[in-house]
């Protein structure tokens, strides 16, 4: 027996596990202090009524012989794929049903998609970015190179023709910075991928937070993207499915064998999303469902506005929030990311996410999320005011 030694190259623990451990220790030592969590990007509003009604109906169906469902198609029921297809059509993107794969979330698929690629591929990842991109490739033993995202390029790195990569991760709106590529910028990435025979892995998990209709919400709004890009999206942030688990991945037929291989992979290693959950997902894309989830997103955007306005008053540099649930700020007084985390926890009992956990370029920065309740967000910012005014 030989173990996968690549795991020894990972950080000792996942970023959010370290945060949870620190918060737990502080809470145990200070049981009388209320901690406000603006760190992990988990939603707080309940599922919308349309989703709940659809799932209740599906539960009833599962209790009747005539409508009971057992194993479903691993790639998802057609009623969900059709709903996703219609959603994309409204953005001018035409998809075939067999290009749409329903899954239990973008995080799973972003890791699982790597089954299709040789470990000899070189992977290009922006820095800073969601740590799962890096960790899953380290687990597989791939070479990872980084695209330099920083304040000077507004955390939107562009292709460097001197760097050759086979797999390219793009997250727009970006987690953690909230930066969004425009169509011209994404076209340069598509052209780069096509010229290098590379595949873009495009994470669109936060697309529903984009306010400007001129900004692309799918990479397939860019000419040529179907020939070089796989898109991942999740209902976790769009519709509050963090605990319900449903998302979808688009593998265009133009990618040839990759579409067939992904189907083969899913039918072998995945048994599909539960029928009840898929009925809830279908409801997200109805006219009423879209109305309800937009109200929830507006709630979180208002929280982001509260955070941004407070930081502006305090003279703390920050970006994000406008097209994203995240606010990316420069740590005051040149503190390091983890020092600021500890300072904020100890002196204001507010939890955020250290930027260093998202990569080397994240050092000295900090991420706050707008997914908390309105009341907690306001209180957290009042504590900020007292601490930094």
Image (cartoon, helix red, strand yellow):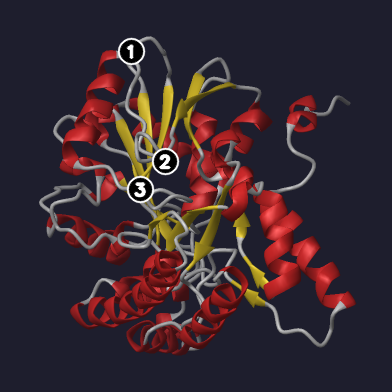
- Real-space Cα distance between discs 1 and 3? 22 Å
Mark 1 and mark 3 lie on one chain; the one further toward the N terminus is 1
Q: Residue at x 81, y 76 (%)?
A: 27
- Quadrant (top left, top right, bottom left, bottom right) of the N terminus: top right
Q: Residue at x 54, y 75 (%)?
A: 385
Up-down relation of residue 40 to residue 185 (above or below): below
Q: How busy is the neighbourhood of tag 2: few (under 14 within 10 Å), some, or many (20 plus)?
A: some
Residue holding disc 1: 161
- Judge left or right: residue 142 versus residue 284: right
Q: How busy is the neighbourhood of tag 3: few (under 14 within 10 Å), some, or many (20 plus)?
A: many
- Real-space Cα distance between discs 1 and 2? 33 Å
Residue holding disc 2: 263
* Residue 36 percent location from the top left of the image: 63, 77
Q: Residue at x 32, y 14 (%)?
A: 196
Q: Residue at x 18, y 78 (%)?
A: 287
- Real-space Cα distance between discs 2 and 3? 32 Å
Q: How many marks?
A: 3
Q: Residue furthest front?
A: 389
* Residue 285 percent location from the top left of the image: 26, 71
Q: Nearer the viewer, residue 175 or 255?
A: 175
Residue 179 image label: 3
């Amino acid at each position: 027996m030989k173990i996968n030694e690549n795991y020894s190259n990972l950080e000792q623990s996942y970023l959010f596990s370290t945060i949870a451990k620190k918060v737990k220790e502080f809470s145990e030592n200070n049981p009388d202090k209320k901690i406000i969590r603006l760190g992990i990007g988990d939603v707080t509003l309940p599922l919308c009524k349309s989703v709940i009604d659809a799932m209740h109906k599906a539960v009833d169906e599962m209790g009747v012989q005539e409508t009971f469902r057992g194993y479903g198609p691993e790639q998802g029921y057609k009623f969900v794929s059709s709903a996703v297809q219609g959603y994309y059509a409204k953005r001018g993107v035409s998809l075939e049903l067999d290009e749409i794969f329903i899954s239990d979330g973008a995080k799973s698929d972003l890791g699982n998609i790597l089954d299709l690629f040789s470990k000899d591929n070189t992977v290009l990842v922006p820095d800073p970015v969601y740590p799962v991109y890096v960790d899953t490739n380290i687990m597989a033993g791939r070479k990872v190179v980084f695209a330099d995202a920083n304040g000077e390029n507004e955390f939107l790195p562009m292709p460097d023709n001197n760097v050759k990569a086979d797999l390219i991760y793009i997250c727009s709106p970006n987690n953690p910075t909230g930066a969004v590529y425009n169509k011209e910028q994404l076209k340069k990435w598509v052209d780069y991928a096509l010229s290098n025979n590379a595949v873009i892995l495009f994470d669109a998990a936060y697309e529903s937070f984009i306010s400007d209709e001129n900004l692309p919400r799918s990479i397939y709004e860019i000419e040529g993207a179907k020939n070089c890009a796989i898109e991942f999206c999740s209902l976790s942030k769009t519709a509050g499915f963090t605990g319900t688990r449903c998302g979808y991945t688009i593998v265009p037929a133009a990618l040839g064998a990759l579409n067939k291989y992904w189907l083969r992979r899913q039918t072998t290693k995945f048994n599909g999303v539960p029928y009840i959950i898929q009925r809830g997902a279908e409801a997200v894309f109805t006219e009423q469902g879209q109305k309800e989830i937009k109200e929830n997103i507006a709630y979180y955007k208002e929280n982001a506005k509260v955070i941004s306005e407070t930081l502006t008053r305090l003279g703390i540099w920050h970006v994000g929030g406008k097209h994203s649930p995240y606010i990316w700020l420069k740590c005051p007084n040149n503190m390091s990311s983890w020092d600021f985390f500890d300072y904020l926890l100890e002196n204001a009992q507010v939890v955020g996410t250290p930027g260093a956990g998202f990569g080397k370029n994240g050092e000295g920065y900090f991420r706050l999320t707008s997914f908390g309740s309105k009341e907690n967000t306001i209180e957290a910012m009042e504590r900020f005011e007292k601490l930094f005014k």
